[in-house]
Image (cartoon, grey):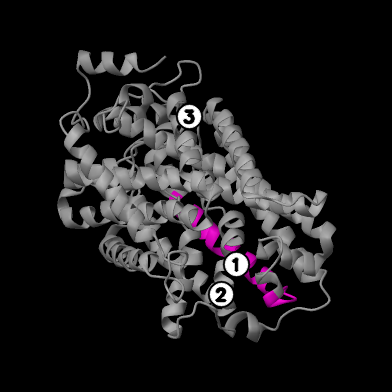
């Protein structure tokens, strides 16, 4: 990978001025506060990926879909493929550093309809991610309360905790991007220290550990399917589910200094740091398993919690669960920031019902306040089925992965199709651009199919994988609204008329 010298200044106020001029060249008047540095931009994607959220929440899934061998080797292989996707996406981000991110890139490279469908896939994926992350945090909170106080979690109590978490994240995001950046920076060190503490405790304290042979070769199939290759393919989803959300760096680019470089670097750095730390976490958990079946069928409902209890005792497990819960809270807060910027950007181009409201920005904090509230409100609605059916909730949150992952590949594919018409920004892959781009597109096509495959046999109403239905619903909704809003939706070709300046100014309240 090579990076050509930046076209714009990279330091101080000159950097902010040049980036805001670049934003005007892309068609937008700057209205958000550019108060986030390069580390903060990396931190938001790292926080959204959140290995202490994804790996811990999905560990039970991995235990039955291939077991230790697929979890460890699958993480290594999927992480490499996601790094290719991230590098290819970073190159396009460097050329188009806007809050709209994926849909704006697709619009510029492929046209209005490409941008429209990419935007809806990305938006609903981001909103589904808020629901999935914060509900997962509520589940772990329930396990913590059960251990600490003996409270038995119910769907109702879990949903109440979930709503409290959403309210917390909305409130934190209203204070402005500087606080979001500070929290994300703390999140990085919390995650890395948390992984080190968990892995260290699991390596030192238990009297017994699993053998390397068990950790790296043991294959477990509780899916009902007989073909081990099929089961292993499904098992890759633990890693692929976790490696999502790194487009957050792109969505915060209008609030990042030297965004044309910093946002691209933030995407790539978040992936490879998560890749290394996540492998250590999965290995540490797997080596420390004392009772495989007991952990899978844990009364806590959270297999990693049972592994911690068996290996460290109730007190040690309670303390480390608290570390995980805080990490998940950091993750959800970062996801609200990313989703709200997507709501703001999509509304700025008149793509959403009520766009005039959702694109409004606070004059005090320079934050899209209505977009923040809409993001958490939709997440709450998406999680409502959890009160009645875990299967239904899983179907709704499938919108996250089945929406957001294909959206990553669309700008990359359009960049490849554009050939020499694509003008790279200061962060570029150079001669590796095409091979890395095609690897990324093919990999996303493969995992999109994996997302839609049935994960257990026999396939019933309770065990069906509803991801393909979720994808169809997203596309139908986008198509219906296209016929309503296609005359008003457009990304600007250039910025600068008096009328455009007036319209943007009116959105700052």
From this view, report whether residue 106 is shown above or below residue 369: below
**Residue closer to the observer: 150 or 401:** 150
Q: Name which residue lies at 50% across and 77% down.
A: 223
Task: Characterize the magenta stretch by its predominant secondary structure.
Answer: helix
Measured from the top left, where is residue 350 in percent x and y? 26, 29
Q: Secondary structure at mark 3?
A: helix
Q: Secondary structure at mark 2?
A: helix
What span is in magenta?
Answer: 267-293
Q: Earlier in the sequence, mark 3 or mark 1?
A: 1
Q: Is residue 125 magenta?
A: no
The crowding category of the residue bearing disc 2, from other C-alpha atoms within 10 Å (few below 14, some 14 to 19, many at least 20), is many
Q: Is residue 273 magenta?
A: yes
- List the residue tagged with mark 1: 60
Q: Name which residue lies at 45% across and 76% down.
A: 457
**Residue 50 visible to an observer of this rendering:** yes
- Numbered badge on residue 373: 3
- Image position of 453 (left or right of 309): left
- List the residue tagged with mark 2: 64
Measured Cα–Cα span from mark 2 to mark 3: 38 Å
From this view, report whether residue 28 is shown above or below residue 509: below
**Residue closer to the observer: 247 or 373:** 373
Q: Secondary structure at mark 1?
A: helix
Q: Are marks 1 and 2 in contact (CB under 8 Å)?
A: yes
Q: Quadrant of the N terminus?
A: bottom left
The crowding category of the residue bearing disc 3, from other C-alpha atoms within 10 Å (few below 14, some 14 to 19, many at least 20), is many
From this view, report whether residue 126 is shown above or below residue 491: below
Q: Quadrant of the C terminus?
A: top left
């Amino acid at each position: 990978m090579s990076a050509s010298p930046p076209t714009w200044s990279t330091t101080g106020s000159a950097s902010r001025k040049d980036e805001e001029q670049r934003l005007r060249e892309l068609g937008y008047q700057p209205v958000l506060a550019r108060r986030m540095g390069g580390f903060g931009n990396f931190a938001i994607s790292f926080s959204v990926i959140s290995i202490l959220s994804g790996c811990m929440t999905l560990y039970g899934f991995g235990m039955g879909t291939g077991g230790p061998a697929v979890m460890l080797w699958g993480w290594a292989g999927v992480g490499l493929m996601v790094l290719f996707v991230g590098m290819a996406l970073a190159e396009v981000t460097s050329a188009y550093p806007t809050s709209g991110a994926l849909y704006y890139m697709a619009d510029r490279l492929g046209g209005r309809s490409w941008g429209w469908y990419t935007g809806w896939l990305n938006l609903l994926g981001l909103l589904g991610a808020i629901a999935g992350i914060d509900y997962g945090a509520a589940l772990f909170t329930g396990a913590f309360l059960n251990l600490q106080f003996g409270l038995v979690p119910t769907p109702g109590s879990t949903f109440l905790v979930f709503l409290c978490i959403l309210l917390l994240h909305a409130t934190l995001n209203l204070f402005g991007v500087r606080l979001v950046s500070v929290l994300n920076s703390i999140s990085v060190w919390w995650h890395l220290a948390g992984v080190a503490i968990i892995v260290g405790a699991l390596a030192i304290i238990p009297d017994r550990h699993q053998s390397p042979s068990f950790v790296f070769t043991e294959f477990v199939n509780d899916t009902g399917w007989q073909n081990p290759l099929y089961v292993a393919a499904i098992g890759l989803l633990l890693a692929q589910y976790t490696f999502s959300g790194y487009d957050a760096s792109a969505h915060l680019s209008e609030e990042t200094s030297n965004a044309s470089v910093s946002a691209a670097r933030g995407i790539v750095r978040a992936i490879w740091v998560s890749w290394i730390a996540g492998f250590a976490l999965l290995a540490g958990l797997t080596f420390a398993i004392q009772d495989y079946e007991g952990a899978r069928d844990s009364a806590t409902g959270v297999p990693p919690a049972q592994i911690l209890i068996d290996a460290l005792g109730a007190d040690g497990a309670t303390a480390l669960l608290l570390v995980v819960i805080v990490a998940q809270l950091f993750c959800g807060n970062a996801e609200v920031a990313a989703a709200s910027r997507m709501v703001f950007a999509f509304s700025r181009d008149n793509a959403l019902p009520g766009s005039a409201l959702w694109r409004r920005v606070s004059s005090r904090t320079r934050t899209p306040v209505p977009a923040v509230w809409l993001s958490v409100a939709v997440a709450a609605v998406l999680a409502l089925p959890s009160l009645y059916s875990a299967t239904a909730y899983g179907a709704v949150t499938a919108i996250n992965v089945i929406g957001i992952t294909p959206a990553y590949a669309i700008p990359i594919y359009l960049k490849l199709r554009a050939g020499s018409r694509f003008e790279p920004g200061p962060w570029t892959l150079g001669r590796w651009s095409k091979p890395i781009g095609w690897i990324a597109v093919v990999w996303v096509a493969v995992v999109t199919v994996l997302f839609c495959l049935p994960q257990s046999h026999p396939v019933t109403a309770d065990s069906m994988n509803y991801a393909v239905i979720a994808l169809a619903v997203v596309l139908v909704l986008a198509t219906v609204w296209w016929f309503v809003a296609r005359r008003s939706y457009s990304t600007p070709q250039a910025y600068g008329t008096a009328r455009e300046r007036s319209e943007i100014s009116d959105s700052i309240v």
